[in-house]
Every structure is written in C-alpha cells, then in structure tokens.
Image (cartoon, helix red, strand yellow):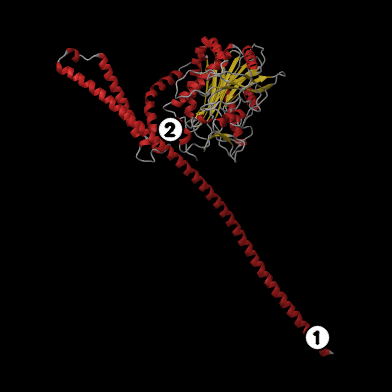
Amino acid sequence: MKRFAEEKAAWKTKEQERIQAAIDSVAGDLDIERKLRRRAESLNKKLGKELAETKASLSKVIKEFESERRVRDVMEEACEALARNIGEDKAEVEELKRESAKVRGEVENEREMLQLGAKSGDSDLFQTDPIVESKCCDCFAVLECLLNIVRALRMGSCLSADGRSGLPGSPTSESRRRNGKRRRGMRTSSFDYKRDEQLRGIPGRMFFNGANEVASLFTQQGRKGTNQDAMIVWENFGSRMDTVFCGVFDGHGPYGHMVAKRVRDSLPLKLSAHWEVNIGSHEVSRELSSSAMGSMNSEDTSILCLDEVSRESMDLEEKEKHPEIFFTLRESFLKAFRVMDKELRLHPNIDCFCSGTTAVTLVKQRQDLIIGNVGDSRAILGTRDQDDTLVAVQLTVDLKPNLPAEAERIRKCKGRVFALQDEPEVSRVWLPHNDSPGLAMARAFGDFCLKDFGLISVPEIFYRRLTERDEFIVLATDGVWDVLSNKEVVDIVASAPVHSTAARAVVESAVRAWRYKYPTSKIDDCAVVCLFLDSNSDDSSPSISKAKFNQHESCHEKQQPQSPGGLNRLATVRAGPEIQPEEEEEEETPNEATRMMGMGEDWSALEGVSRVNTLLTLPRFVAGHEDKKHTGGTKARK
C-alpha cells in the first residue's frame, strides 16, 4: 500500500507538471498572438490613413482634371472667337487699304493739277483755289487718319504674328491697352489736375476726416490694403445756402479706390448741373413724360404693374404727396448717375472693367430729404418716437443679389446669382459661363464686365419730409453695417460728447466689433458721415416714401413687372434700357411709382454674417473694352 501511494503521488506530480507545461505553452501562444494582433491593428491604422490620403489625392486630381478641362474649353472658345475676329479685321484692313489708295490717287491728281498750273504760268491756275486747297487738306487728313488706323490694326493683338499676344487678357494685350490709355490720359491729366485744384478751393466742401457745423466725417483703412472708401459733405450745395449734399462711396476691385474718389469728385458736379437745368423746365418735362406714358408704341414707355386707371390715380396721389423739389431732384439723380457711369466707362486713366464703387448720396434742402442709392452702403435716420425714445429708421435698402427683384433682373439678363458652399448666406453675381467675379451687390458704378448681365447703376430714389423729431442722419459703408446694427449706430452717435467726434466714435466702435465678432477676418474699410439736423418746424408725417426705378441694362428682352417678395411696395416700374456709353442719345426720364417702407424694418443682407470680400475673383481672360459686342463669347471661363 505504501508503494502504491508513492506511485500515485509520483504520477499525480507528473500530471501536474504536464498540465503546467501545457498552460505555460498556451500562455506563450497567447502572448505571441496578442503581439501579432497589436501589430495588425497598427498596420490597419496605417493602411486606413494611407487610404484616406489616397482618397484625398484622388479627389484633388479629379478637381484639377475638371479645372484643366474647363480651362481647355475656355481656350478653345477664345481661340474660335479670336479666329473670327482675325477674319473680320483682315477684311476691314483690306477695305481700309482700298480707301487709302483711292484717297491717295485723288491727292496725287490734285497735286499734278497744281504743278501744271504753276508750269503754265497761268495766274488763275498758279493761285490756289481755296476750295481746292481745303479739299486737298481734307484729303491729306483723311489719308493720315486711315494710315493711322491701318498701323493700329497691324500692331494690334488680332493681327499679331504671335498667337499668344493676341489672346484677350494676355500680358501683351493688356500692356498695349494700358499704354494706349496712358497716351490718351496724358491729354486729360492737365484738365483733371486743374479741376481737382478748383474743387479743393470750394468753401464748405469736405472730403477728409474732420467736422464742421452741420456734419462729422471719418474714415479708417482696414486690413485689406488701400482704403477704398471715400466720403464728402458739401455745404451750400449748388450755391444754395439751405442745401447740403452728403455721400459715401465704397470701392471694390483692383482700382476701386480710384473709382470711388472719381465718383466722389464728379457726381456732385453732375447732379448740381442737372438740377439747374431741370429747375426751369420741370413742368414741361413732366407733361412730356405723362404724355409719353400714354403711348404704348414708344420705346421709352415704362412697363407698369398696375392698369391704366390705377396708374393714373397713383400718379395723382404721388403728385399731391411730394413737393416739386422731389420730382426735380429725382430726375437729376437719375441723369447724373447715368452720365457718371458713362464717364467711367470711357475714362482713359481708370480701368473700371472689374472695379467699381457703391454710392449712397443725399440732398437736404430745408425739411426735404432726397436720397439716391446704388449698392450696399446704407443711410439711417436717428429720430424720436411718440415716447420721446431715440429710434433708428433705415432710409435705404441694401441692394444685394439676394433681393428677389434684383435676382430676377440679373437672371433675365443671363447673369447668375448663387452663393458658394462655404458662405451660403452671401449671394453673388457671376458671369454666365465663368465663375467670376462674384460681386456681392446687385448695383454699382463701374464693373462693366457684369453690365451686360444684369448689373446696373440706376439708383433707388428715396424721399422723406423731415420733422422736428428727426435729429441726425448717418451714411456709412458696409464695413460698419456688417458688425453694427442700426440701433447701435444711432446710440453711438447720440452718446458722442460733441458732434465733431460722432463719426469717429462710430468707426472706432465698428473696429472693436470686428475684432470681437470676427477675430480671424480682416477688418474692412469704414467710412461714416453724420449729418446733424436743425430743429424742423414742419409737423408732417415722418413716413418714408420711396420712388424706385429699375432698369435692365444690355438685356435684349423686355422685362415683366415684378413685386419683390419681402419688400412693402405699391408697384414696380420698369424703364427702358440704361444709356450705353457707345451711343450718344438723349437722356431718358423713367416713369415711376411710389412705394412705402416701414420705419422699423432693417434691410440688411449681412446681419450677423461673417465678413466676405465684395469681389471674389477676376476673369482670367476678358475681352477688350472696345469690343463689347463679343463680350459674352470672348470671356474665358475659370
């Protein structure tokens, strides 16, 4: 028994050792498997990361491929248009050569006749006939003109032996255009300099930071480069002691600062000139305008949203509601803005093709206030309500592409209106087949790359009869309104210790708001004009009436009447096409309908939205300013 017990104990010990060895073996296998699993997980992570990078690279390659495909399509279209232009220019050169040869022959015949008369000694032939001499001089002048045209065409981009230099938008083409403008501009620089000197000497005209008895001005450069904002206050405007002109201008694009300053200097002069002309002849103009509205066969007939009976009653109501100065200044504003835009198109020293400016301007005469607005700058009024509380009344509408009326006009003229994915709240204006320039406003001076596609420079005209409750008016660019509300601006102006510091206080508050609300954004330029009103004895109703004129420019189809959603308006007036700079034609006076805007409404397309650039991109290939007929075909696509 003892031996059996020993054998059993030995066997049990061996079994335990064998089991322990098996357990150790399994534990070792588990450690190895755990290490392998960790290594596999690490490899899987690396593979996942590489797969994501590969996917991103593939997406980038696809985007580059699409971009290259669009560029190739653009190049093909540009080449086709260039080929057509070359053919037309060659035919024109041949015709000019034939005319030149014909004129040269006539000149040679005249010269031979003069030589024969001199040799024959005939006094009648020797003494040059004034008519023949004049004709000979005219022939020489015509010949010289034709030769200059032929030389210009031979040197132009369309006839260049280097195909690249003839491409619209190429460096050579652009340099020639700039050189041509520089040569033409030398003839006008002396006149511009003299005019600027005269403007600086006008008493009561302010356009720098400062203040006077009635107004306060201040502008500050942002963080985007040159300050493109401009402003002006002109007391005794038009040699009238009781009249003040104010305006702010927000430029955009490569030459926006030049456009804004040009409009600041020229627009008041044009407005004053048209005002003087309209004062004596306004009654006749109104009669002609009313008779023209009755004829549906006239090209200048406006399209109204109301029937004939409603229109007549509305016109009668408007005549009873507004004073004579409203009708006179309304026509003056429309004509001055039209002529100003035409001057910019033809200006030899400022390239306005992809540059422009907004303009919110006002004329105050006694208790009458008339405002003309183009773009997204804004005018507000600080007034007292029935409880003697200071409130803000917005006097203008921010004319942005997201307004239904503006978007409809742009789309009817083949332009596009949409917002980018990374800024869905900001609608922009784009060329029909090119993702540029992305303008964030529906009306502006300049920007002639979009003038054929719905962008216009026709101002909205607003009228208000001031009362003793009205205290001040604030004009400012969107650099202020993007970060401050109307009520905040009114409170800042009212809390200024003295009137002379009010405009500066608004700008400084806007800069602080920029840094607080959008610390990663570049601060925009800011310009503010505060016009302080004297105590008005008139107790008229402070309601605002607005006459708005929408004109579609370079659009070949008549637009239907529209009533933009969200705007409380009685009717919409469609006038004829805006004047084109290439044609000299008589100024048209559009018909109008009055609309009402509530005092408490705050029309802002960027309320609470992060700041965006006014102009996103410039067209890479653009047609020359002289060839507007082929603009749609020669603009390249991005």
List x then y, in percent, for residue 570: 65, 21
Circles 1, 2 touching at the beta carbon (< 8 Å) = no
Question: How many other residues sit within 10 Å of disc 2, few (<14), some (14-19) or many (≥20)?
Answer: some
Front residue (pair 168, 419): 168
Residue 594: name its quadrant. Answer: top right
Residue at (62% x, 60% y) in the render: 44
Depth order, front residue of 579/322: 579
* Position of the N terminus by quadrant: bottom right
Q: Amino acid at mark 1?
A: Lys
Cα gap from disc 1 to disc 2, whole angstroms: 111 Å
Vertical placement of 530 versus 616: above or below?
above
For label 1, the crowd category at 10 Å Cα-Cα, with few meaning under 14, some 14 to 19 and many 20 or more, is few
Label 2, on which residue?
624
Q: Secondary structure at mark 1?
A: helix
Which disc number belongs to residue 8?
A: 1
Identified by mark 2, the residue type is Gly
Q: Is residue 384 left or right of 87 when viewed as pictured?
A: right
As helix, strand or loop, the secondary structure at mark 2 comes to loop
Say if 80 sits above or below 295 in the image.
below
Does 620 sit above or below residue 246? Answer: below
Earlier-in-chain disc, 1 versus 2: 1
Which residue appears at 49% of the width and 45% of the height? 69
